[in-house]
Image (cartoon, rainbow, N blue to C red):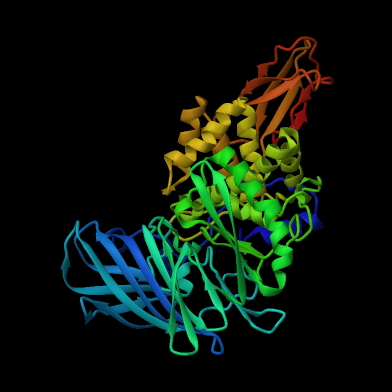
């Protein structure tokens, strides 16, 4: 959700639409970008199966020290691998079977040399000791890093948030979204008067001397590195449960001591209704084994799997505002609904390359409208999506460039939601559309996907060809123009302009708003066989279609 702040600000200050052009040139990327974003043989030769991240947080020094046990399965023979850790963080030593390994560093990449060749199809591990002062986030979660704050009682209140910039900002790992560990143990040592809350379930706590406590959190499901988080504060804990499609789901809340009375009714009003709606649309919550948690943070929020960071101040809307301008966004807490939507799209289904982060954000933006749809009706959800168009800027495509750790534009939120509403409108069968959304979460359960996976699945399940539509709206900034013209004998014709090659999309056309029918339009002029249709009385569904109209 890291670009969302800019989108909301733009929407509030500039409620207009800018028609864009195709991205005219590629950004320039460096060796540093390639080391982070590319899957070289030094990364594909092994598959991470487990992390045990064990750190001690020195709050006065704003530093951390500890280790990460990396267990992996070897895919190919190798004697060298790459892991990642930002170059401002120190590697103290790397152990393999009790002996130190040699390594070199280039930017944020760490190249580890083994004394002998490691054979394929074996299980092995290394233990990396590290320390340092992690990058401090000035505007978490937008810039990424550690957020060192204090609560109203002057007690430390600390959180990590590092989507995009990467988990290797503060701990050593294979920092690429294509490789998720099957499970993780997160051990965090903090002063005794404080608590650390991380992903998954609390296994136990340990007394470390007289002044410290270690909290051990275990995640039993695959999890992406950027989702692994620490949250340190003077928290109080309360619980609830939800009877869902897979049985009883445990719900845990951790909030600052002074906010418990505000939190209880607010979470009650938002969380279980959200789970009910999203299980209807997307299928069972994907992480029953690890529970569902909200953890209060000083920053706005982040979709940390099974431990969502929450900082919306117990308000409905986005800090009390409705970015759509329709009023529908004020009926629910934006951060709870949006970040929880990521449990299905982003955490369950994860883009293998950050260039396809539009998959996470487009479906999750759309989940907001589906929440409204579930409780207030389809028209209300569509009104919300239409209102969100005001924030679309169309300066660059919503898909980034592969292999260089480059995400697309912030339009992946609202433009992405608009795209999915159009796909639903074209399919024109809400039961089938719901089965597609649920089917995505079955087909790609706990998996990594790319653009082709998503498009091909929707094509297959719908029986329609959406290739050119996805290419148009995901890979370009062009807005299709529906050109309406009239021949000398009074026949009305239509065709698409300002599109990718061989673009075609059915659109609803008629002579009255309540009498529109879907007609497939291509880049070639075609006559519209609608009784009594003229260029003047033509009606086109521009409410659900993000298009421009040109009458010649």
Q: Quadrant of residue 548?
A: top right
Q: Is residue 21 visible?
A: no
Q: In this view of the protein, which residue sits in the foreground, 202 or 543?
A: 202
Residue toward you, 468 or 382: 382
Q: Residue placed at 68% from the left, 52% from the top? A: 270
Tell me: residue 165, above or below residue 372.
Answer: below
Please determine whether, in this image, residue 25 is positioned above or below residue 213.
above
Tell me residue 55's x, y (percent): 43, 79
Percent position of residue 420, x then y = 61, 38
Image coordinates of residue 429 in percent, x first then y, are: 60, 25
Snapshot quadrant of residue 231: bottom right
On the image, the x and y values in percent for residue 382 come to 72, 37
- Near-viewer residue (53 or 519): 53
Task: Identify the residue at image location x=54%, y=37%.
Answer: 437
Relative horizontal placement of residue 299, taking residue 489 as reference (left or right)? left
Residue 466's place in the image compared with 369, above or below, is above
């Amino acid at each position: 959700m890291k670009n969302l702040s800019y989108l909301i600000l733009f929407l509030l200050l500039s409620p207009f639409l800018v028609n864009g052009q195709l991205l005219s040139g590629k950004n320039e990327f460096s060796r540093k970008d390639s080391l982070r974003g590319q899957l070289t043989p030094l990364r594909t030769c092994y598959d991470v199966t487990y992390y045990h991240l064990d750190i001690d947080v020195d709050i006065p020094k704003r530093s951390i020290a500890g280790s990460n046990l990396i267990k992996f399965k070897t895919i190919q023979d190798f004697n060298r691998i790459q892991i990642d850790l930002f170059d401002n963080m120190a590697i103290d030593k790397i152990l393999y079977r009790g002996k130190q390994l040699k390594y070199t560093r280039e930017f944020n990449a760490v190249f580890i040399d083994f004394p002998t060749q490691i054979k394929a199809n074996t299980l092995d591990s290394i233990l990396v000791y590290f320390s340092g002062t992690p990058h401090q986030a000035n505007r978490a979660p937008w810039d990424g890093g550690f957020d060192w704050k204090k609560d109203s009682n002057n007690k430390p209140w600390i959180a990590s948030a590092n989507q995009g910039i990467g988990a290797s900002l503060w701990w050593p790992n294979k920092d690429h979204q294509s490789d998720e560990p099957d499970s993780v143990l997160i051990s965090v040592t903090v002063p005794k008067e404080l608590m650390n809350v991380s992903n998954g379930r609390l296994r136990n706590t340990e007394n470390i001397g007289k002044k410290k406590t270690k909290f051990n959190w275990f995640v039993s499901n695959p999890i992406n590195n950027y989702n692994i988080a620490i949250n340190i504060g003077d928290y109080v804990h309360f619980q609830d449960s939800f009877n869902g499609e897979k049985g009883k789901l445990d719900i845990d809340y951790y909030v600052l001591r002074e906010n418990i009375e505000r939190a209880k009714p607010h979470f009650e009003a938002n969380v279980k209704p959200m789970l009910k709606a999203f299980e209807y649309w997307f299928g069972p919550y994907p992480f029953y084994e690890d529970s569902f948690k909200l953890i209060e943070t000083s920053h706005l929020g982040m979709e940390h799997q099974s431990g969502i960071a929450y900082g919306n101040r117990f308000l409905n809307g986005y800090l009390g505002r409705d970015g759509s301008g329709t009023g529908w966004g004020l009926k629910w807490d934006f951060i709870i609904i949006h970040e929880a939507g990521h449990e299905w799209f982003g955490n369950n289904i994860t883009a293998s390359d950050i260039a396809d982060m539009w998959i996470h954000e487009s479906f999750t933006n759309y989940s907001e409208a589906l929440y409204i749809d579930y409780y207030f009706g389809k028209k209300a959800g569509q009104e919300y999506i239409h209102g969100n168009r005001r924030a679309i800027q169309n300066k660059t495509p919503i898909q980034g460039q592969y292999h260089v750790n480059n995400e697309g534009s912030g339009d992946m939120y609202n433009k992405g939601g608009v795209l999915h509403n159009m796909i639903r409108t074209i399919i024109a069968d809400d039961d089938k559309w719901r089965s597609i959304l649920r089917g995505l979460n079955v087909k790609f359960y706990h998996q990594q996907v790319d653009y082709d996976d998503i498009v091909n699945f929707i094509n297959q399940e719908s029986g329609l060809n959406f290739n050119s539509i996805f290419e148009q709206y995901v890979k370009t900034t062009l807005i299709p123009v529906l050109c309406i013209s009239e021949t000398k004998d009074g026949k009305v014709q239509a065709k698409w302009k300002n599109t990718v090659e061989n673009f075609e999309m059915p659109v609803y056309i008629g002579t009255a708003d309540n009498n529109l029918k879907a007609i497939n339009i291509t880049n070639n002029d075609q006559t519209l066989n609608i009784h009594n249709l003229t260029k003047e009385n033509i009606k086109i569904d521009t409410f659900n279609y993000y298009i421009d109209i040109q009458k010649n």
